[in-house]
Image: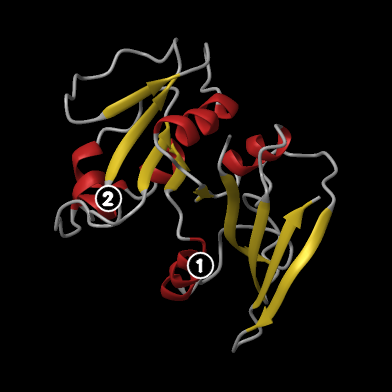
Amino acid sequence: MRPHVVGHLAVSVDGVTAGFDVDLARFYAMATLWQEDVTLVGADTILAQEAVLRSAPLPGPREAGPLLAVVDSRARVREWDRLRDVGHWSDVLALYADQTPARPPDSRTRELITGYDRVDLDDVLQQLGKSYDARVVRVDTGGTLLGVLLELGLVDELSLLVHPVVVGSGPRWQGGFTGRLDLGLANVEVFEGGVVWLRYCTL
């Protein structure tokens, strides 16, 4: 059985995921609600944080933390040791496809290879449930990865922290997903400054 998949994102009123200030402490404190077993991210999200990661303290893996699983079909991520040791996750898992380019050997980094030229996300979730006992997967993304998961019908819950700003252009929370998705409202909460938390379950 595949795990429950949650997309938790900070967005503008017009659905953009960048170009405005986000209270990251609040965002990640809210993320603990799901007590995720796995944090699923795309390579672009990791690469955007590499500069910060290189200068971050490295207290070592957090034993009680979730597993970090990174979709990296083109083998662009290199900072696996730092990701493991930054203190947020218990371990890291590289998600590759059969046609992923050769990468430097790293005996410490576990790999899951599935799909031909792109990572098979459906199989990834099945394997996370079967082999890693994952019950909840939280998707941490700027939108691209979440859009693919939406396209595949693999998202069970959406959590949108809507900020009172119209950005006009930029990456959208649903990525390239253009289909229809019926949702049931699970919760609404308003925070100081006009930030609204909308939580939906897919029907």
The x and y percentages for residue 38 are 43, 46
The x and y percentages for residue 1 are 58, 34
Q: Badge 2 local density, few (<14 within 10 Å), some, or many (20+)? A: few
Q: Badge 1 local density, few (<14 within 10 Å), some, or many (20+)? A: few
Q: In which quarter of the image is residue 77?
A: top left
Taking depth in this image into account, of 196 and 65 the one nearest to the observer is 65
Q: Is mark 2 on a helix, strand or loop?
A: helix
Taking depth in this image into account, of 167 and 9 the one nearest to the observer is 9
Residue at 63% x, 52% y: name it.
170
Residue identifier under label 1: 33
Name which residue type carries label 1.
Leu
The x and y percentages for residue 91 are 27, 43
Query: Marks 2 and 1, Cα distance to the nearest angstrom?
Result: 28 Å
Residue at 23% x, 53% y: name it.
63
Q: Quadrant of residue 58?
A: bottom left
Residue at 65% x, 64% y: name it.
160
In this rendering, is residue 58 above or below 109? below
